[in-house]
Image: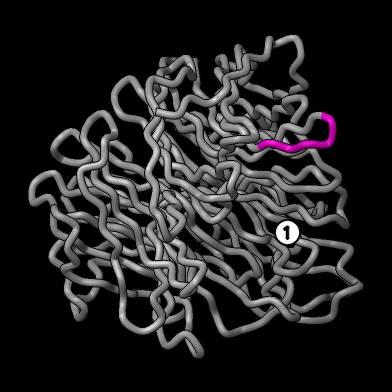
């Protein structure tokens, strides 16, 4: 076993930013001497205590080294301790294309990751941590020809582990899907190089095994076509318990990519990701979020149990990246959407609650913007994990210039309340009120009509969506036109209550506001 160098940083040297409320917290951490930080995952290890995971690019004397970073956080997101692993001879690489890079089982946390040695060879690693962030053991997986790039680990039904990812062959430019089976101590039992016809490129971003049949489900992406002419599609692999392929699926009908998969209480599987659309905004390809529920006995012609490959507005960035099943069978699905659908990006984090039958019960948007109005604000949600009080914790990658970028974690209660005092004061309103413009709606409260002033710079078509406290769309007014520089909305048929209003101009979000009907 190769043991990496461990560094412990006392709390006094940390530069941190933490906001909190009764409902949750936002915790941004900058860890000297890190030039950059990449958020990966966070788990509740006991009520009010958390283990946060990431990668820090430490830079000393002009030399940068990627290190695994494990932080203990308190009930308000404050840092209780930090441990870092890695050195220049064996450093841990950041894979920006994965969502859930860590996995919690029992009283331990595991990660399947990629390492680079001093010869620039990429190796696979499986590491076991206790809840203090200390390593229990580390296993290395090598190949004499190809690089091994793990992307996720999950428990196998016999007490061992299943690791997925891809092989990288730099000679043939093939990247077939990777599957490694280990025992409970991470010792390799067997591995599979899952080839495909045509362009031999596909990966595994997430994996889960059915506890009854032993069937293995892997999701990710694949290239369909020849090496000279191919398209990117979502990839669903259903394998038997020994890693032999039963069926390979694609569902989106467009280009696609899947990031996460879970098995639900009814023993089927739900996967989430993004579907690429042919419509362009400027020179950028557009996307919509993608969710599909799959029968475990799926064939190439079996339709999904249910699915939605056109979720939310068309945007430059619109993707689901992770999901969890709540005790009542509902699904909470996390992702991001560019609320402006233009460059520079204005990325909102989004949590959608689905019923077991696939209907939308609520949508919540959170704007964690740091940069100025004219700067690119890019963020990626990498994990959602449930907490003991019915809420959840999220890890979010935030990228902006100048660096360093923070490690960013957010705690939510069961209503979706985070650290925003204004949002927490409107508990039950399942949208975060973070539009790109203050709409100045009047009168508010109102009995019959709302007016939205200050729209004289726009002359196209407007639409207004109004949601109730459960996130259900109760009013959708389209093709509204300006009247003397303002918009008028008749709400006479809307019941009394508190609502959330979103204003769109030519399908682009202009702003949001909380409104009250008397």
Decide: is 322 above or below 75: below
Camera-side residue: 25 or 229? 229
Q: Which colour scheme is used?
A: one colour
Residue 370 x %, y %: 79, 42
Q: Is the stretch drawn in magenta largely helix, strand or loop?
A: strand
* Residue assigned mark 1: 450
> Which residues are the magenta region?
61-65
User: If the image is split into quadrants, where does the N terminus sit?
Assistant: top left
Q: Is residue 220 magenta?
A: no
* Classed neighbour count for the residue bearing mark 1: other residues with Cα under 10 Å, few (<14), some (14–19), many (≥20): many
Identify which residue is drawn at 60% across, 24% down.
84
Identify which residue is drawn at 89% across, 63% down.
454
Q: Quadrant of residue 283?
A: bottom right
Camera-side residue: 105 or 178? 178
Q: Is mark 1 on a helix, strand or loop?
A: strand
Residue 250 appears in the figure: yes
Camera-side residue: 186 or 496? 186
Residue 518 appears in the figure: no
Identify which residue is drawn at 46% across, 56% down.
147
Q: Does the magenta stretch include residue 63?
A: yes
Identify which residue is drawn at 60% across, 38% down.
39
């Amino acid at each position: 076993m190769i043991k990496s160098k461990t560094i412990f940083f006392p709390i006094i040297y940390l530069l941190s930013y933490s906001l909190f409320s009764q409902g949750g917290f936002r915790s941004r951490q900058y860890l000297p001497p890190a030039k950059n930080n990449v958020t990966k995952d966070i788990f509740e290890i006991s009520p009010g205590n958390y283990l946060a995971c990431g990668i820090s690019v430490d830079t000393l004397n002009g030399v940068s080294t990627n290190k695994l970073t494990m932080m203990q956080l308190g009930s308000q997101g404050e840092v209780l301790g930090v441990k870092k692993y890695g050195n220049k001879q064996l450093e841990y690489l950041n894979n920006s294309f994965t969502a859930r890079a860590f996995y919690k089982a029992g009283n331990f946390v595991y990660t399947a990751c990629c390492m680079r040695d001093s010869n620039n060879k990429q190796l696979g690693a499986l590491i076991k941590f206790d809840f203090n962030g200390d390593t229990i053991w580390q296993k290395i997986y090598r190949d004499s020809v190809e690089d091994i790039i793990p992307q996720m680990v999950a428990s196998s039904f016999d007490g061992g582990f299943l690791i997925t990812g891809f092989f990288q062959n730099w000679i043939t430019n093939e990247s077939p899907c990777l599957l490694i089976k280990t025992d409970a101590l991470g010792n390799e039992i067997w591995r599979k190089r899952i080839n495909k016809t045509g362009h031999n490129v596909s990966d595994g971003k997430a994996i889960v095994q059915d506890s009854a049949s032993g069937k293995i489900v892997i999701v990710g992406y694949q290239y369909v076509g020849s090496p000279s002419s191919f398209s990117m599609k979502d990839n669903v692999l259903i394998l038997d318990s020994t890693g032999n392929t039963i069926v390979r699926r694609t569902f989106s009908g467009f280009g696609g990519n899947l990031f996460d998969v879970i098995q639900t209480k009814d023993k089927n599987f739900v996967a989430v990701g993004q579907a690429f659309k042919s419509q362009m905004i400027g020179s950028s390809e557009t996307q919509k979020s993608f969710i599909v529920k799959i029968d475990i006995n799926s064939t190439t012609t079996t339709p999904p149990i249910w699915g939605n490959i056109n979720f939310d507005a068309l945007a430059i960035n619109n993707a689901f990246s992770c999901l969890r099943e709540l005790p009542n069978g509902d699904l909470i699905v996390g992702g991001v959407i560019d609320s402006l659908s233009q460059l520079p990006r204005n990325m909102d984090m989004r949590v959608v609650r689905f019923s077991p039958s696939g209907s939308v019960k609520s949508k919540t948007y959170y704007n964690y913007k740091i940069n100025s109005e004219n700067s690119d604000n890019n963020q990626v949600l990498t994990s959602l994990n449930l907490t003991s009080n019915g809420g959840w914790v999220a890890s979010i990658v935030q990228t902006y210039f100048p660096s360093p970028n923070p490690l960013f974690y957010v705690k939510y209660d069961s209503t979706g309340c985070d650290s925003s005092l204004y949002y927490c004061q409107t508990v039950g309103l399942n949208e975060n009120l973070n539009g790109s413009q203050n709409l100045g709606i009047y009168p508010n409260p109102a009995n019959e009509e709302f007016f939205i002033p200050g729209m004289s710079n726009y002359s196209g078509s407007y639409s207004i969506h109004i949601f109730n406290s459960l996130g259900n769309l109760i009013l959708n007014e389209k093709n509204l036109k300006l009247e003397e520089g303002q918009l008028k909305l008749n709400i006479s048929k809307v019941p009394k209550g508190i609502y959330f209003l979103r204003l769109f101009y030519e399908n682009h979000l202009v702003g949001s506001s909380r409104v009250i009907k008397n």
